[in-house]
Structures are given as structure tokens and as C-alpha cells.
Image: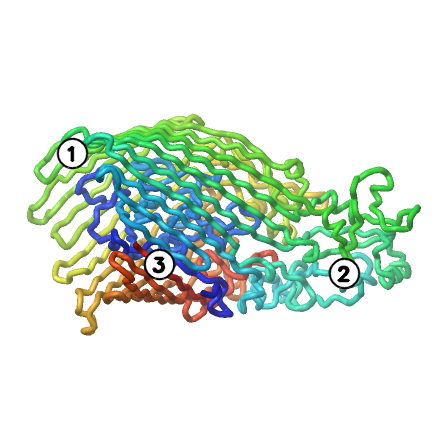
Amino acid sequence: MSARLSACAAALLAGSLLSPWSAAAQESVDADAITVTATRVKTGFEAPTPVTAIGAEDLQARGTVNVADFLNEIPSFTPTTTPASTSLLSRENGSNTLDLRGIGANRTLVLINGRRHVPTATDGTVNINVVPSIALSRVEVVTGGASASWGSDAVAGVVNLMADKKLDGQRGDAQNFRIGGAVGSEFAGGRGYLMLAAEYQRDKGVEGQRDRSWGRKRWGLIGNPEDTGPNDGIPAQLIAQNVNMFFANEGGLVLGGHPAIHGIRFGPGGTLAVNDFGEFNDGNSQIGGDGGNMGQDSEVSVPVSRTNLFAQGNYDVTDDISLFFEASWGRTHSVTETVQSFAFPARISNENPFIPAAFRTIMNDNGITGFNLFRLNTDMGFITADSTTETFRGLLGLSGGLGGSWTWETYYQYGQTKFDNRQLNNLIVENFANAVDVVEDPLTGNPVCRATLTGGAPGCQPLNLFGYGSPSQAAIDYVNGTGLLQSRLTQQVVAGSINGELFDLGAGPIGFAAGAEYRKEKVRSSADEASINNAFLIVNAQPFDGGYHVVEGFAEVAAPLIAGKPGIELLEVNGAVRFTDYSTMGSVVTWKLGANWSPVPDLRFRGTISRDIRAPNIGELFASTRLSFANVLDPETGTNTFTPTLTGGNVNLDVEKADNKTFGVIFQPRWIDGLKLSVDYYDIKIKDAIGSLAAQEAVNLCAEGYADACSTITRDSSGVITRISTQLINVASLRTKGMDFEASYRVPDSSFLSLGGRMSARVLATYVMDKEFSPNGVDVFERAGEVNPNADTTLSVPNWRGTASLNYDRGDFSGFLQTRFIGSAKYDNSFTIEDINDNKVGAQWYFNIGARLNVEVADNKSVQFFAGVNNVFDNNPPAVPLNFLSALATNPIFYDVIGRSFFAGVRAAF
């Protein structure tokens, strides 16, 4: 099998999560199935919280290689952190996290078999790449506040990844990029059960944007030279093609200074040419001409490999007591690159012997003693982030019965994540300054670093920047270095709970659950000396240590009040409360109230209100000051600057508080068998949200007169921003409202166009009414209905998103057709005709198809062949550019940047 089935396909997207046709076949979760995530009460009670259940058939039919890829197609998720949306400056490059409602992955709680997973990063999130997809039998997604039931972070909801506990036999799939297997069996006469699973996936990613037709168009934002000022009806910015950098190219460009040398660029070997500044150059960007373009070499999708092992089992020690365990190990590795560039110039003295003779003549003729050289350093090695995450989780517990309906469970869990991030070929600013200050050695006549003549800068190698390919390897090795960040995060959990029925009020038994939990988390991060001293151009990691512990107690009750009465087929109420005491910030109480009312069997109304929390994670509490960079537009000077920013943690942070509301209706008419319709309204209001003023926001607020914002900004004597320093505080607020729609229908067997077989359809859609964000508690920005990649990226969202699937099964053959819809949006809600020439981004449709064929090779042994096409019509993403520093000329969170791709593979079960 070829890894690339089409010349235009970026990678083979192959695989499936598990095989529902194995010895222990798992059917797709039925709409009426009792879920375990929406409530801790284990009775026939149907929770009022909206739940989307995804079964084995759903998972394997789509043909994705990672469960995160499948879940991120559900409209209620926003794929803010994926291999296509992460970058060099992010610690999560290559990660796959889950973000319900697009309000941050750290506000979505991830469980494994109903238990909190160890974080894989100091922000408290879980990289789903460490979870072996082949071990899963079901996924349950709870949308709505669940902190009272499950604890901190369940602000937007809960995702429960449930491992297969009924597998009897073996199964596996193999293809170029993923191979996995699972085996399960009872032992000791049925008293024990053991399941083992292993999985390996390798995704080669997609290299430069130049490899895509839409990427080669070089969409970008550029200043409009025809704009005369405010209120003139002329846009200040243009979305245009072929946008390049104004102030740098690959061989070096002289800007400013004496008119005789301004605009001279250097070609290979130091040849001279007059630079073409193109059209509409605004001091940062230009259309056409000889300018460079960093985005052309930016990766469309980060290459990732992952290895996962998983085991679980149980043994009935007695008839009433069972011993159970879970163990998992996962390792992910990703590498991402970006072009070396610097917005500051290299100051070149006329003493530099590398200056080409023709250029030196011009300098001498005009009495020029020095000049500024700007350069895009593609010949000095790409800055490369090499990241490895290794996670272990072990759990041992006991469960049993107390008589009647009462059960108990207790367990101890230990988890550990090791993170290693190396920034290769990172420019060392001081070494670069020494290496470009070159003079002639008076003894040898050879080029030498000026500093070495006075005994400074040991090991300095003179750097020739005149023309592409001119820097020597020795000089490159001197000016570049490797930054290192290593983190070790540990989590320990001791928990116990009881569950049972209290008494019966006549409509059914009252279910009750209660328990307690102790959790301790700590982290230790180390960094190299150069990073600690902020020596590198970007990503200077800082070491930090910290930890906290939390003690929690919870109780939940579910009570059917009335049943079988006229106008009240069923009335149920649900309530939960949790007391939480943090070592860092004290105690807090969360709660939830919910109800179900069915006036007739076909119709059910449901609703919940809750108070939820997100506690500050270890990184937010204890992170040291860290240097990074941001591109900001300074309203005071009207210029874009690539500005150093300093951020850090705050041990005085308090919890975020969220008020959650959900109200919905479910309609299942008895006279249309197999049809289910539901609609749910949600309202999430978060106050005291943790965050810092983003660099651009701080600059904008300062320009509007906010003193607190101005205090974070440092300027030089000419007014140019040289640094922005912020600290995490409970300053922000966020509110999002919307509606979820779901429709499913299963056509009765043998009734579809007389073809026989089984046809089913499912539609999921989300409409985001509002998404109001205030970074400082004063200004409010509406993020619903826009896709601006620079507008609090994870918060911007189109109003409408949806997915629909059609599945057909007949005997050993099955096929599917799926479509995804992203509604039209504005580039930025705040823009008018005064700001941009085209503020509209059109709607996008994507279509995927696939088919499977089962072949029985022996009794209880079978092979399944599957294949399909993603993005059948090869739709290009819309142009949503930022600037020449933007990695992609679109928003990869919402739009497909891969293009048409093919998947194919084989599975075996025996």
C-alpha cells in the first residue's frame, strides 16, 4: 500500500478506532442508552444534562486515526490545539486537545473510564495523543457544567473516554501510518478479566505552505496607500495576494541610511542588485517585488508520532469484592520548524572585510561608515522545536457491594508526565551581535570578530551575511544554540465513593451517590542556562517548581417525583454539591440542579443550572517569567513591531467561577420508529477568568488611556515599544450562549429503496449566538461570527457549524457519506469599511466518503478492508490572512488545510 495514493494528497489518513464486528461486537450507542458521565448516580435515572454518545460503529466508520480527529468534527468542539493549528512558539506543538465551546481546553475535563486523567502539560490539559484509540469502546461528551459531579475544569463539560471492558478475542488494524492491536479474555473461570492494547501512529505532516495552491498565492494584510485617514470611506488595510516582507529577503537588504545604498540587495556570492519594493509597501509588507515571505516555509501540519500501551483488568477476590487496575503509557514526538528572521537590523561597519568590493566602492565614494542590513536567514538553518511527551498512569482499586442496590469503590491513582522540548538553531542574540561585527585581523589579514581582538567573545566566528549561502558553518554554529525545557509533572489521587438507592416515593427509587477525593499535583521544570538568561531570540524557557493539593467531598441525588400521571409521564429532579478545599486558594462550593419533565412518552424537557469552577493550574500559579515575541500594531506610532513580551505566573490567583444554564427538549415520536430530534440552549458565564492582557490588547488599551495597561509597556526614547510585561490575574470575563441541534433517524431494515440493508442518518449542528470576551473587565469584544486568527484566536468562532452523516449497511458491505459545514463569518466583528476592504469569509462545505467490506476467512475470524476520501472536492481554505509573520494565510482551527486526501487499510479480528 502506498503512503500517498494521490500526488496532491498531503498524507495518507488511514485507520479506525476499533472493529465493531469482532468477537465481542459493539454496536453504536443507542439514543436511549444509560450514560455514566452525565451523573454519578447509577440508576435508571436519565440525566437532564445534554450528552452526545459516540459508539464503536461511529468511531470506526469515519476512518480517522485518532479519536481527537473524530471528536473535533463535532460542532460543539473547537479544535484549537491540533497538529495543524499549533506552532513553534507553543509548548503544545503537535498536540491534540479537546475544547468544548471554544473557551479553552483547560475548561473541558477529560476522564478515562470516569476518572480524571493525569495532565500532560502544566496548563492542566490532556494531550489525547497519549490515549490508545484502539482500546476505546465508547466516548461520552457532556455539554454543560459538571464541576459538582466531577470537580474543577468541567466548566464547558466533560469528555469520558471509555475503554472496552467486554473484548473477548483479538483485533487489530495496520496501515502505513498506524498499527494497533488489542486482546481481551476472561480467566480463572470467569472471575477475572484482562485486556491489553498497543498502538503506534506516525503522521508525516505537511511541509511548507508553498506546497499548496492556496498557500502559493501568499495572501496577506497590507496597509492601503490610498487611505487618507478616519471617516474617509477608504479601508486602512487590504486583503491581497502576493504579499511579501518589505524589510528583508534571503540574501540581505540595505534599508535606510544614505540614499546611495538604500534598497540595494545582495544575491549569491555578494552580487548587487536594486531591490524591487513592489507595490503598496507600508513599511512592513509589500505586494510583489523581491521581499521574503516567512509563511511559505511554515508547516501546514506538524509531523507527529505516538506510541501507546494500555492495560486494564479486574478480579473477583470474593463474591462481593473485586480488585481492578488500569495502566497506560504513551509517548508522543513532534518536530516543527520556522524560518530564522529578525526584525532588528545587523549593523555593519565599513571595516567589515566581507563587504563586496562593488558595494564598498559606493560606500567610499559617499563617505558611508556603516549601514543596517536586514535578512531572512533561510540559509542558517530553521529554528526547530523538537518536543517529546511521555505519560504514565497507573490505578489500583477495590469495588464491591454493600447489600441491596448499594455499591462502593475506592482507588489510588499515580500519574506522571515528562516533557522535553529542545529549540534547535535558535539565534543567540549576543553571539550574533559579536559575529556580525567583523574586522580584518592585523596579524593574518583574515576576517575576525572585533571582540576577539580584545580577548572577548571566546569562540566567536565571523559571519558573512552578504548573499544567500554566504554564512560559514562555523559561524552558523556559533550564533545558533539549543534551548532546553524539561518538565516532570506528577499527580496522585485517592478517592472513594458509594452509590445506591435511598427509598421510593412511588415514581421510582431515589438514587444517591457520595464520595471524597484527595488529589496532589506538583511540577518541576528545568531549563538551560542560556534560556534562563534570555539569551535566545525566541522561546527562552524558564525553570519553575510548584505544587498544590486539594481535598473534595461530593454528594448527588436523583429523584423521580411523579410518573404515569396525566400530563406528567415522568418528572425527575437531580441535584449535586461538592465542597473543595485547595491548599493554594482555600475552599469553594460548586453545585448543580436539574430536572426532566415528560408530559407524554414522546416528549421530554430538560434543564440544568450550575455553579462551576476552574482552579488555576500549576503553570498559571508557579510559572517563572518567560520571554517570547508578539507582532503588535502600535496605535501611537502606527507601526507593526515584533515585540518581546514577558509573562509569568501568580500564586495569588483565585478560581474562575462559571454560572451555567442548559434548557432543551427531546422529541421521539412513537409513530416514526427510529427518529430522534433534540435542541438545547446553553449559557455559560465566566467571571474572574484567569489571563493576562495580550500584547495587542495591552497596547490598544494603553492608547485608550487605561493606566494599568500602560504600566505593562516599555518604550525607548523614540517611543518604540521594546517590551510588554504582563502577569496572570483574575481580570477577564467570558460569556457564550448558543443552541445545539441533533437529529438522528434509522430507517427500518430492508425498507430503503427495496435494496435491503440498513440506512441511518445523523445531523449535529451548533449555533453560537454570542461569545463576549472582556480581557480587562471593561471592554467587551464579540467573538461569535468572526474567524480573525489574531482576535483571541481560540475564542473567535463562526455562528454556524454542523456535520451530517449517512450510513448504509448491507451484509458484509457498508459505506458512509459525511459533510461538514462552517458558516459564513466576518473577518473581524469590529471592522468596518474604514478598516478592511473585504470583511466577509464565505461558508465552507467539506464532503468525505468511505466504504468497508468484511471477509470471513474462518470461524470467528475475519478481515475487513476499508478505504475512503476526505475533502472529496479538494476545497481550498478561504483567505483569512494576518501578516507576513503569520504561519498560514487562513485559520486552521476551522478550515481544512490538507486538501483532498485518501485513506485505506485493513483490519483483522480473531
Counting from the top left corner in percent of width and height, residue 30 is at: 22, 53
Counting from the top left corner in percent of width and height, residue 899 is at: 47, 66
Residue corresponding to mark 3: 907
Residue corresponding to mark 1: 405
The answer to which of marks 1 and 2 sits earlier in the sequence is: 1
Q: Secondary structure at mark 3?
A: strand
The answer to which of marks 3 and 1 sits earlier in the sequence is: 1
Residue corresponding to mark 2: 467
> Horizontal placement of 38 versus 133: left or right?
left
Whole-angstrom CA distance, mark 3 to mark 1, is 41 Å
Q: Residue at x 32, y 43 (%)?
A: 195
Of all residues shown, which one is farthest toward the right? 443
Q: Amino acid at mark 2?
A: Gly
Judged by depth in the image, the label closer to the viewer, 1 or 2, is 1
Q: Residue at x 17, y 42 (%)?
A: 44
Q: Which mark is residue 292?
A: none
- Is residue 829 visible to us here? no
Mark 3 and mark 1 residues within 8 Å of each other at the beta carbon? no
Q: Amino acid at mark 1?
A: Ser
Judged by depth in the image, the label closer to the viewer, 3 or 1, is 3
Mark 3 and mark 2 residues within 8 Å of each other at the beta carbon? no
Counting from the top left corner in percent of width and height, residue 457 is at: 79, 40
